[in-house]
Image: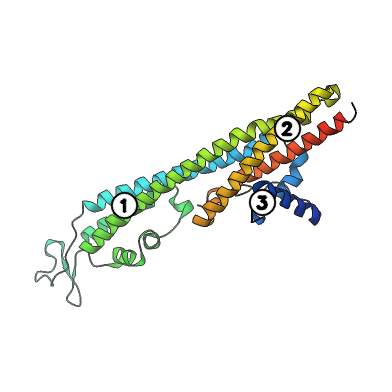
Amino acid sequence: MTQMGGGVGRLPTSSVEESVESACYVADCGHPELVAAVTVLCLTAAFLLLSGIVLDRIFEARDALEVERTRTRAERDAFDRFRRRVTTLDPTELGPPDPQPGGGGVLAVAGGSVRDDTALSAARDAYRETVMATAHYEEEYDESLAENVSEEFSDTVASALTGGDALTPQLHLALADGADRARRERDELLAELDREEAALSESEDALTPAAEAAEGILESDLDRSGYADLIADYERAEWHERQVESLLADRQATVHERESERPYWYEYLYGSLRSPYPVLAAGTETLAALADAKDELAGAATTR
């Protein structure tokens, strides 16, 4: 799977570097480049932040995840249907030339070999009508039968399926076993997508109240608030800040772990979004809003 808003103004390098260091400190990361992009977004959007803008990132991520889940499930089911169709076909043992050419569907060809492509043709049709018939196939893959079989099975299997003489027992077994493996891989991917969905839900649970708290402070008339109320709001903002910092630290660790196991995992999932790290982006933006809110509260408190 593959898959910006307005332009980003030129920012002082020192400010960007300090913000990257701050974000990395929060996430305890050893790779500041992972958060550099979301930090720039944070710096340019800090004063425009509303809870809806922050949470849009999570909603967009959930939508992208659902698209991938739908496609993965369709591929899993397609490979299962292909496997079941292949297992109903009778493989052909290549033998000596038929003395009666044309009899029983067996054709003698130059070189003294025997060709019986009835089952082989049926296997090719089965692949086209299952795996290559998924709704997203052309958009995501747009490959010929030979190209896709080569990617999903092997070059050898692709060559035998598209240009072989018959559906031999060896090819028959390779197709059935390969389809079963492809089905299991999609099941494993679906389980990983479910875990990512759960992580998005946990992130939303932490970010929603934090973003709403920051928004409430920034939109309120602090001139009407008493000193005790300002201090209470400040402490509440700090509490949310700690929750978001903890979320970012956990998420950063997860990013490093997942991408060491499966490189470009988040680009694969979220490449179509404004950032391939939507939780880090939303969390960093939320911290920026909370920092603005605390500044407003501190400034108001000094006039009391």
Q: What's the mark number on residue 31?
A: none
Above or below for 138 versus 204:
below
Residue kind at label 1, given as amino acid type:
Asp
Q: What's the mark number on residue 35?
A: 3
The reply to whether callout 3 and callout 2 are in contact (CB within 8 Å) is no
Near-viewer residue (258 or 184): 258
Residue kind at label 3, given as amino acid type:
Val
By what rule are the colours in the image chosen?
rainbow
Q: CA distance from mark 3 to mark 1?
A: 39 Å
Q: Which residue position holds label 1?
A: 180
The reply to whether callout 1 and callout 2 are in contact (CB within 8 Å) is no
> Where is residue 64 drawn, in percent x and y?
54, 43
Taking the image as shown, residue 39 lies to the left or right of residue 164, namely right
Residue that appears at 40% across and 61% down: 151
Q: Which residue position holds label 2?
A: 237
The reply to whether callout 3 and callout 1 are in contact (CB within 8 Å) is no
Q: Nearer the viewer, mark 1 or mark 2?
A: 2
Residue that appears at 71% across and 30% down: 213
Residue kind at label 2, given as amino acid type:
Ala
What element does badge 2 sit on? helix
Query: Badge 3: few (under 14), some or many (20 or more) residues near its Cα, within 10 Å?
Result: many
Taking the image as shown, residue 234 lies to the left or right of residue 179, namely right
Residue that appears at 66% across and 41% down: 245
Q: Nearer the viewer, mark 3 or mark 2?
A: 2
